[in-house]
Amino acid sequence: MYGTINKTARMHTNRIIIYLMLSLTLIIKGTETSPSSSSRYQDNYIEEDKYTPGFLTLGQKYSIAIGSTVILPCKINETDKPEDYVLAWKKDIAILTAGPVKVNMNPRYRLMPSTASPGTVGASHGYNLEIKDVRTSDAGEYVCQLGTIVPREIVHTLEVMVPPKIDFVSPPSRLDASKNSAIRLECRASGNPQPKIIWTRKNNVMPNGEANVTGNVLEIMHATRHTAGHYRCTADNRVGQTDTREIFVNVLYAPEIEVERGFVHTGVGFEAQLTCVVHAEPQPHVIWYKDTTQLGTTEQHSQQTRGNKYSLIIRNVTHSDLGNYTCQASNNLGRDRGYLTLSGIPSICIFDSPSVSHYRDQYNITWTVQSFSPVREYRLFYRKQIPKTFPDKENHIIPSHAYQFGGSNLDNQWENVVIPEVYDEQGFRYRSYAGYEHVQNTRHRRSFLIKALTPATNYEVRVQARNDHGWNKLSAIFHFSTASEDMEPSAQPAVLKGLLDKGFLNSSTSIQCTFLLTTITTLASILIASTFST
């Protein structure tokens, strides 16, 4: 039995030696008569000679992601004497296989017998080369060669696609830069194909206003507080997942103050809040002043910080609390100040009446104003709208010496009227059209009928209000026009008007009311006709 085993081993060894010798001959012949790359593919056809093999497969390029498996095909037509040639696989000059035998013992390489494709006429055979877990070192040219008298071969090119990987980032994670200094961020990556670097900023656009910037280097010539943020560099080559790194850019600068409202309206007994928006890095120290006196935390005054908003809260405002305030912010790079005024005067009046009058010679104008204390009086200024070519005197009020509804001879001269507010002992404000009205909030509404106007004419008007603390600033100019003809209200039957006044007419009874109106009109016509007939 042992003799039989030894005999079988010797036969297998001899066969391997024969294949190796044939392979060596194949290499030598291939070196001596290696065809040019242009002639390789000219022989890729099935020859009619049944003793000479030919390729059924053309060489091609394969782009495979790293870690994948690729099968390189090599099919030849069937011949009567397949033992007269050897089919070998080579990579560059290294022999991988010879016939069915692996010369290169790499476990990732495997020979797979080739079979005829469905629908192919005639038989075929050969060996496909399978490469598992493809690596970057596997990239190159793979040659399937026939060891005939004149060696023939096909060439497959294997390109290994590698996902992006960021190899270098500068600075690694954080950069502290001074205001107005230049900033340079760098990000480099490897992969196949070469990745593209895209810069973005978390929850914000880039400093140039764009959504992203492409390139290995991101440069910002002059850093400001708006430059700070989390910058991301992303490497992408459309293979696998992208790779991302983040760099936090921190810009150091002295405090910069924005006053939320420079003029704050309030009233005695109310609560007021003054707010400064402070931008600074490092964190600033904020101090509040009333005139030149530094304010601390008391029952009357308290300070509140929310993000970059620093507020001074004044409870139960008194007359002495009204005046000028300063918020001062400082850090080791400098300081800044913001100035605010706490005032009890009314806010600026706002007109809310329609811009076209229903009448040709009069106009009912209305406006609102906020005042924490009772409004004592108003001053209303109006004039015909001056042409644009006339010198602009919007902020220069020239009141006439005597108030006249008809205006004056000077078109650019403002007519004015003083409108007092009258209160009784209980704090009710007298309104000529609605009796007395109690003032329950700080929003005041007023109207005034301007008479003796010119028909079909454009006018402009301004108003200001005074309370116990003084006059507010003039309102913006409001424009209105008088009608060319009076718009008379449409006449309605007296009985229908009574029904309407009682709320009889509503959306749910519109059909019944229409019928009722028709009936009443018909009856009235019959009564009138009968009266005249008698």
Image (cartoon, rainbow, N blue to C red):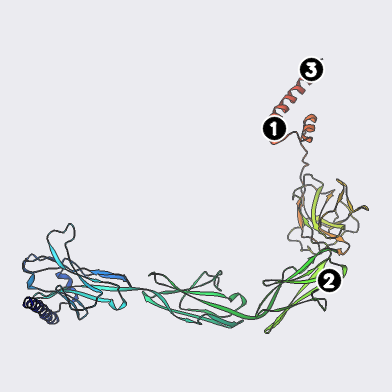
In the image, what residue type sits under mark 2?
Gly
Q: Residue at x 68, y 30 (%)?
A: 511
Tell me the amino acid under the disc marked 1: Thr
In the rendered image, which quarter is residue 337 located in? bottom right
Q: Going 39% across and 71% down the picture, which residue do you hit? A: 237
Outermost residue on the top side: it is 534
First-in-chain label (2 vs 3)? 2
- Picture coordinates of residue 105 (x, y %)? 21, 78
Which of the two labelled residues, at mark 2 and mark 1, occupies the earlier sequence position? 2
Q: Tell me the residue at 50%/81% (across/down).
A: 172
Question: Do residues under tags 2 and 1 come within 8 Å of each other at their CB atoms?
Answer: no
Task: Left or right? Give the position of 120 relative to 197.
Answer: left
Q: Which residue is mark 3?
A: 530
Q: Residue furthest front?
A: 1
Q: Residues within 10 Å of mark 3 (few under 14, many from 20)?
A: few
Q: Earlier in the sequence, mark 1 or mark 3?
A: 1
| Residue under numbered circle 2 | 323
Q: Amino acid at mark 3?
A: Ser
> Which residue is located at x 71 percent, y 35 percent?
506
Q: Which image quadrant: the N terminus?
A: bottom left
Residue 509's label in the rendered image is 1
**Position above or below: 220 against 476:** below
